[in-house]
Image (cartoon, coloured by chain):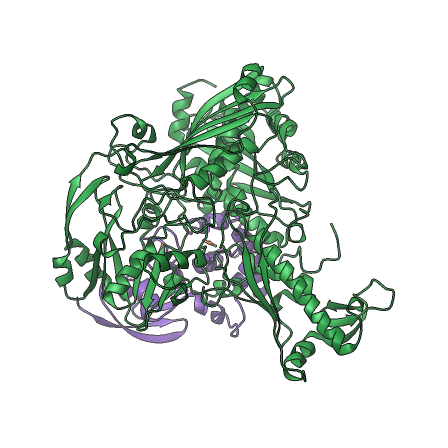
């Protein structure tokens, strides 16, 4: 590791942490405007129903009610909360199949109307006074049932519930032949679960129109500029008249349902007053979006030497009631499933299916966690058949330098070392060999690997545009539209900029919380923050540095290459010396900036840069998780004792931030593996896992000992070698647990979450 | 609904407010007083985000009635540092540890976590790791996985013990 870095690599406090610790930070849910009304949603009690009529007159007549809306009051433009038709990404497999509010309800809880009133009690009463006449239709909740002929059709225009079938563009070789030739073939069908985002800040929106027509929207949103365009199109407003404000959000884990804002905007428009719409916990699940649920049939062919010769996947996607991000998530899913290991013959195809349950969308990890849940269990099944250690089988198949990742070649060769390090940390050999029986519990240890991307490029535009300026006090301000959702992206960028410019990281300021006045930016998703925004700010900082040195060179009459920036000073390098650090300070940054504004005889000028960055690579972060656990064979309860996760981050710009991302991901992976379940009724479609009592998030008491290890081997194209991390903690926890359960009790749990009931059922009273 | 005038103290200052019988303490603090540090995440007593201290004891303000605050002394996150004599701009040792240990990501759970940690450390100044997990067991965080939160509370416990000379 190079030692001449002074800011990069340090555990510095996260951006905004002091304000958060003191309660000073304002989230959109904390906002209020004078005269603000309370918005409330009316939900369908039926899983599938046409709205014959909707009578709003009694609600409208209630004193204190200023707006009552239904589908008739919303522009009936086909809409998809997560898809943009403007050339941002390939939309050939996407579907715009919803209206913000439609004339048909497609799941229990689908929004059929909304009100705005002076207070909550009046709003609740107004909802009660809306008379809706439903024509109740038969409904279907299970994805396989939905594919059967004669099943109730969720979207009439398709004629059946199959919305799209698509192959994986990366399919290659001859899979069937390779499977026929392979001495070892393993196959299994896996069913994954509907995990909800459930960030702690409930979904909410505050919308206000100015008398002159400008619209201001406060809400937690990861892609504010993309969203601004969407709102502008829907309500036929010029983009410049819409300002979307999100400075801090209480958790960014995926694109929740953007319909919250259109509904709120429609209410504010009708009421002529600001309206705040705050979702309940149940609504923050039901009316937002979950991870896609998949039925995955996977097959691997392996040579006698333990090398993969075929990877095949057939995946059925349960989109829920609306298509949303089914295509993008599933393409990523197939790339993860078929791409984690080297293999000459791969094929995958997907079938997306509608059901009458809440819709799915992109959630931390996209299709990765389901992919690794299936693939990594298949790998263990193959290892068993080959009589090979599961770690060894993975080492024989990991990708190497130059192999292709999702779209670009791997930039470093780290996966084998990462897996070996994890095995060492968990004590693999010794734990595989220890006695399993310990009273009522059986002990096991398991492994699972993963890989990911550092942004959506080249499939989606992850381009960044930003401004960077030297302030007259010698500090730097960056103007970029990036809401802070807790990933400390801005703090990490401050460290990168400080490193390049030789200033303190606290001298880097951000103006980032609203779309107003910002250059275009694709927003936050796909593990891409650090890599794409980081590269953009590093480039901008280098340009600014060049500008500063040129200014200094002109002032001092010294060639630029004899000047350097250190500790907020311009220093003179001794002739022939490479040592800038020890050079003599000749001018402070403050004096330079100040003079350029106030003393320059040829006109005042701010030293500033506009950076337009288009990422042209995408290094793959890789990693592995190891679980050490005990299964109680009397109760089926799994007690995870320890989780080890080793992640190749390229370079940790702020190791505490990277660890925190992974630890948080691990807690989500634990919930995904063991208990997060919306409990949607199989016969009525009612979501019973709605609040935190019934939809359980990992609590402090659920957490086992967690050891996160950062592996650093700088990626050549990354900012100081850094690459993505945010989505990665969640990927491999559930499969590592599944493999450890198998090691402990010899049963394969193929369905998520792996509850005690499922484990007991699989054990079937077996004596172990 | 019958409204009443309520007198109570928040962060050392006396307040009067007109409250309805069904108003929650969280509504009183957030909406009437503008103290939005206490967060509402579930609204029904399941997550701890709305934790404040009433007479030094942790209370879920979303599930407590405002009228129960009559004549009581309430401490919210906004007043925590000052309550131990810190000047504006300075942090309470628990807040400082949360900042230093990277225990804050989105920060939405942090005010509740920090106040719950204070209540815990007031009761038990030298907790084990397990006791901290236990004490924060009702406070949910979707971001951090709790590792750094527990680290921070243990580190703050050390600082507080040193300050107290024990
Ligand atoms: S908001 Fe009070 S406990 Fe969740
Ligand atoms: S830091 Fe986001 S919920 Fe805890």
Q: On the picture, is A135 further left or further right than A332? A: left
Name the residue located 34 percent from the left edge and 71 percent from the top edge.
B33
Q: Which of A163 and A435 is in front in this view?
A: A163
Determine the residue positioned at 76% across, 73% down. A553
Q: How many marks?
A: 0
Residue at 54% across, 54% down = A463
Q: Which chain is purple?
A: B
Which corner quadrant of the image does residue A679 belong to?
A: top left
Q: Nearer the viewer, residue A590 or A567?
A: A590
Give how far across and how far down residue A247 sits, in percent.
46, 63
Camera-nearest residue between A4 and A438: A4
Note the chain letter of the green one. A
A145 vs A109: above or below: above
Residue B22 % position (x, y): 23, 62
Residue B102 in view, yes or no: yes
User: In this rendering, is residue A195 above or below A498?
Assistant: above
Q: Give left or right: position of A524 versus A697.
A: right
């Amino acid at each position: 590791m190079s030692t001449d870095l002074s800011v990069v690599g340090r555990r510095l406090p996260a951006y905004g942490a002091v304000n958060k610790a003191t309660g000073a930070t304002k989230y959109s849910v904390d906002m209020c405007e004078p005269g603000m009304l309370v918005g409330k949603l009316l939900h369908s009690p039926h899983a599938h129903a046409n709205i014959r009529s909707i009578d709003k007159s009694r609600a409208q007549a209630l004193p204190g009610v200023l707006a009552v809306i239904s589908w008739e009051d919303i522009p009936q433009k086909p809409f998809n909360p997560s898809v943009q038709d403007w050339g941002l990404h390939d939309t050939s497999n996407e579907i715009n199949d919803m209206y913000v509010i439609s004339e048909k309800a497609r799941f229990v809880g689908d929004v059929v109307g909304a009100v705005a009133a002076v207070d909550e009690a009046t709003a609740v009463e107004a909802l009660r006074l809306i008379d809706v006449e439903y024509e109740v239709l038969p409904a279907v909740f299970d994805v396989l049932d939905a594919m059967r002929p004669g099943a109730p059709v969720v979207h009439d225009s398709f004629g059946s519930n199959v919305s799209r079938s698509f192959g994986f563009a990366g399919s290659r070789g001859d899979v069937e032949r390779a499977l026929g030739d392979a001495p070892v073939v393993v196959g299994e069908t896996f069913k994954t679960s509907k995990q909800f985002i459930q960030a702690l800040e409930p979904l909410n929106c505050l919308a206000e129109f100015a008398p002159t027509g400008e619209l201001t929207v406060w809400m937690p949103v990861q892609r504010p500029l993309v969203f601004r365009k969407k709102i502008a199109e829907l309500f036929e407003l010029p983009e410049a008249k819409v300002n979307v404000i999100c400075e801090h959000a209480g958790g960014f884990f995926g694109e929740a349902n953007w319909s919250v804002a259109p509904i709120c905007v429609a209410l504010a428009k009708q009421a002529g007053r600001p309206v705040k719409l705050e979702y309940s916990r149940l609504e923050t699940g039901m009316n937002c979006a979950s991870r896609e649920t998949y039925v995955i049939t996977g097959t691997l062919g392996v040579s006698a030497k333990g090398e993969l010769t075929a990877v095949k996947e057939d995946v059925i996607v349960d989109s829920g009631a609306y298509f949303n991000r089914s295509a993008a998530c599933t393409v990523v899913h197939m790339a993860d499933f078929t791409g984690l290991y080297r293999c000459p013959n791969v094929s995958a195809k997907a079938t997306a299916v509608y059901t009458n349950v809440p819709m799915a969308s992109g959630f931390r990890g996209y299709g990765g966690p389901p992919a690794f849940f299936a693939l990594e269990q298949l790998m263990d099944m193959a290892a068993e058949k080959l009589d090979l250690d599961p770690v060894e089988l993975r080492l024989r198949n990991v990708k190497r330098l130059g192999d292709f990742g999702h779209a670009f070649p791997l930039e470093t060769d780290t996966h084998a070392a990462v897996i070996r390090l994890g095995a060492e940390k968990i004590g693999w050999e010794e734990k595989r060999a220890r006695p399993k029986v310990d009273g009522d519990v059986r002990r096991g240890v398991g492994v699972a690997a993963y890989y990911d991307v550092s942004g959506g490029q080249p499939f989606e535009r992850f381009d960044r545009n930003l401004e960077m300026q030297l302030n007259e006090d010698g500090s730097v301000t960056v103007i970029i539209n990036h809401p802070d959702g807790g990933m400390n992206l801005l703090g990490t960028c401050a460290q990168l900029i400080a490193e390049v410019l030789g200033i303190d990281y606290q001298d880097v300021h951000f103006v980032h919380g609203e779309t107003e006045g910002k250059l275009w930016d694709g927003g936050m998703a796909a593990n891409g923050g650090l890599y794409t925004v980081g590269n953009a700010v590093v480039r901008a900082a280098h340009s600014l540095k060049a500008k500063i040195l040129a200014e200094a060179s002109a002032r001092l009459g010294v060639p630029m290459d004899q000047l350097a920036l250190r500790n907020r000073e311009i220093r003179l390098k001794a002739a022939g010396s490479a040592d800038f650090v020890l050079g003599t300070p000749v001018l402070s940054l403050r004096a330079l900036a100040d003079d350029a504004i106030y003393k320059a005889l040829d006109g005042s000028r701010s030293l500033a840069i506009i950076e337009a960055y288009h990422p042209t690579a995408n290094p793959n972060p890789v990693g592995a998780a190891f679980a050490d656990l005990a299964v109680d064979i009397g109760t089926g309860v799994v007690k995870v004792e320890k989780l080890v996760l080793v992640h190749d981050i390229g370079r940790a710009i702020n190791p505490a931030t990277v660890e925190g991302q992974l630890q948080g991901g691990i807690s989500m992976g634990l919930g995904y593996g063991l208990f997060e379940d919306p409990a949607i009724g199989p016969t009525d479609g009612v979501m019973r896992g709605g609040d935190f009592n019934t939809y359980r998030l990992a609590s402090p008491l659920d957490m086992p000992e967690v050891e996160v290890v950062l592996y650093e081997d700088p990626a050549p194209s990354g900012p100081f070698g850094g690459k993505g991390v945010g989505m990665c903690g969640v990927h491999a926890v559930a499969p590592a647990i599944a493999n450890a359960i198998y090691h402990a009790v010899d049963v394969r749990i193929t369905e998520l979450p792996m509850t005690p009931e499922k484990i007991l059922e699989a054990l079937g009273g077996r004596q172990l | 609904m019958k409204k009443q005038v309520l007198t109570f103290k928040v962060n050392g200052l006396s307040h009067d407010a007109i409250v309805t019988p069904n108003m929650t303490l969280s509504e009183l603090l957030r909406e009437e007083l503008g103290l939005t540090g206490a967060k509402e995440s579930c609204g029904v007593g399941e997550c701890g985000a709305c934790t404040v201290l009433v007479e030094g004891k942790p209370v879920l303000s979303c599930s407590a009635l405002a009228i129960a605050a009559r004549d009581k002394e309430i401490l919210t996150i906004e007043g925590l540092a000052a309550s131990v004599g810190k000047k504006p701009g300075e942090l309470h040792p628990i807040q400082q540890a949360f900042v230093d240990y990277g225990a804050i990501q989105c920060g939405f759970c942090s005010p509740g976590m920090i106040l719950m940690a204070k209540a815990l450390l007031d009761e038990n100044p030298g907790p084990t790791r397990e006791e901290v997990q236990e004490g924060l067991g009702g406070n949910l965080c979707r971001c951090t996985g709790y590792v750094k939160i527990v680290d921070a509370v243990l580190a703050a416990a050390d600082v507080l013990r040193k300050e107290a000379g024990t």
